[in-house]
Image (cartoon, rainbow, N blue to C red):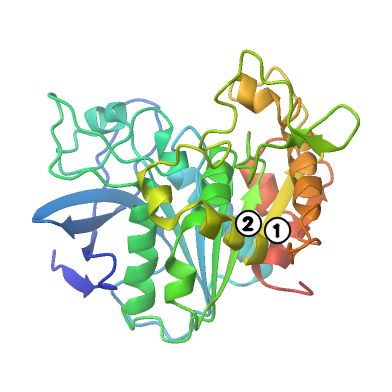
């Protein structure tokens, strides 16, 4: 298959290649492989990541006005999240004018099952959600180690710099659950909105298990915010729950710039009304997670109240509780609230 090359923003220092990829047929049920491959070339190495999309990224399309990226949850089921987004686009009759992309961040077991080579990026457990670098091992040596956030930076840059979608006006990055944690941190750290000021960026954070706080305060029993009792939890304010001990990607931006971005960027929080389980096996029950609240809905409402404490916070209306929804990436993105935020209807 013919490859199409994109030279992206020089600050990223990456050459990106987008090409089709036919998923290997499976003989048992497992997470599905996304059908396309995104290539990253950096420092003489080449690495790949799978993604799904409703438009070919190598073909000119003047009808596209919105770029929508939907980040999957902890199961790495990018194809499912692509289908959730597709369902929403059909319901709103926005499919033609929206470029939907769902990346798929892999673990080593995914590569083994799909018999993918060592040129595919992979991460330890769910470290991709926090922007940590991909890993290498004796069994699967990698020529490059790349932050999961840098991968998305590169993908966005490739699309916006390609000239294939000249009428894009808005960029929406959304994620649910672990993908919501990804977007909550990424929205505050990525430099991409500052490099592409001609586009309107919005970040949609849905049902994350935890949040990145901007200082040492946390919700207290009296409904105020202050430094909690951290006995037995001395690292509660380290990244990704706070701004101490930032990882490599976040450290390049710095804590002060991260705080400024949270105050000024268009970041929306959507919470499922019924996302109240305390026995969810994927709920963060570490001490640093529990300091934020008992369950996802409570943690989200606490964080919304926390942001409102800052005089410089400019988006106090940027949240909704989705009536009737539990912890579900399909119902959340297909909610009326999500549709309004994605297509800027009255927001």
- In this rendering, would 240 be left or right of 347? left
Residue pointed to by mark 2: 204
Q: Can residue 266 be seen in this view?
A: no
Tell me where residue 53 sits by quadrant: bottom left
Give the residue drawn at x 34%, y 81%: 164
- In primary-sequence order, the first of circles 1 and 2 is 2
Asked if 33 appears above or below 266 in the picture, the reply is: above
Q: Give residue 196's position: percent from left, percent from top.
A: 44, 77
Marking on residue 308: none
Q: Nearer the viewer, residue 86 or 51?
A: 51
Secondary structure of the residue carrying numbered label 2: strand
Give the residue drawn at x 62%, y 13%: 232
Q: Is residue 240 visible?
A: yes
Asked if 178 appears above or below 84 in the picture, the reply is: above
Q: Nearer the viewer, residue 127 or 121?
A: 127
Residue at the extreme left of the image, as rendered: 44
Q: Nearer the viewer, residue 235 or 154?
A: 235
Q: Give residue 146's position: percent from left, percent from top.
A: 27, 47
- In this rendering, would 135 be left or right of 202? left
Binning the other alpha carbons within 10 Å of mark 2 as few (below 14), some (14 to 19) or many (20 upward) gives many
Tell me where residue 114 sits by quadrant: top left
**Quadrant for the C terminus in the image:** bottom right
**Quadrant for the N terminus in the image:** bottom left
Give the residue drawn at x 17%, y 27%: 137
Residue pointed to by mark 1: 338
Kindly check if marks 1 and 2 are in contact, taking CB atoms under 8 A apart as contact.
yes
Secondary structure of the residue carrying numbered label 1: helix
Q: Give residue 329's position: percent from left, percent from top.
A: 62, 43
Give the residue drawn at x 24%, y 59%: 20
Asked if 61 appears above or below 177 in the picture, the reply is: below
């Amino acid at each position: 298959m013919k490859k199409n090359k994109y030279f992206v923003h020089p600050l990223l220092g990456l050459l990106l290649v987008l090409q089709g990829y036919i998923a290997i047929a499976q003989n048992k049920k497992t997470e599905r492989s996304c059908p396309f491959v995104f290539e990253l070339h950096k420092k003489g190495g080449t690495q790949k990541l799978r993604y799904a999309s409703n438009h070919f990224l190598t073909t000119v399309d003047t009808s596209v006005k919105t770029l929508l990226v939907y980040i999957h949850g902890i199961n790495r089921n990018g194809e499912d999240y692509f289908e959730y987004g597709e369902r929403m686009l059909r319901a709103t009759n926005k499919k033609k004018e929206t470029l939907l992309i769902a990346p798929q961040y892999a673990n080593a077991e995914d590569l083994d099952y799909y018999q993918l080579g060592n040129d595919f990026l992979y991460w330890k457990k769910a470290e991709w959600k926090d922007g940590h670098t991909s890993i290498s091992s004796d069994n699967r040596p990698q020529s490059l180690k790349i932050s999961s956030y840098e991968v998305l930076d590169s993908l966005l840059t490739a699309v916006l710099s390609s000239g294939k979608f000249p009428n894009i006006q808005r960029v929406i990055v959304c994620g649910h659950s672990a993908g919501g944690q990804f977007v909550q941190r990424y929205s505050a750290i990525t430099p991409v909105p500052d490099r592409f000021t001609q586009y309107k960026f919005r970040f949609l954070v849905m049902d994350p298990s935890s949040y990145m706080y901007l200082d040492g305060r946390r919700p207290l029993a009296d409904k105020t915010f202050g430094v909690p009792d951290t006995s037995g939890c001395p690292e509660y304010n380290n990244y990704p729950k706070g701004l101490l001990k930032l990882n490599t990607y976040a450290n390049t931006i710095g804590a002060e710039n991260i705080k400024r971005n949270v105050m000024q960027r268009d970041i929306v929080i959507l919470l499922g009304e019924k996302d109240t389980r305390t026995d969810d096996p994927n709920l963060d029950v570490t001490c640093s997670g529990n300091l934020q609240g008992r369950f996802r809905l409570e943690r989200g409402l606490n964080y919304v109240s926390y942001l409102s404490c800052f005089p410089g916070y400019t988006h106090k209306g940027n949240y909704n509780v989705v009536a009737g929804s539990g912890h579900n990436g399909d119902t959340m993105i297909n909610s009326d609230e999500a549709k309004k935020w994605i297509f800027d209807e009255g927001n």
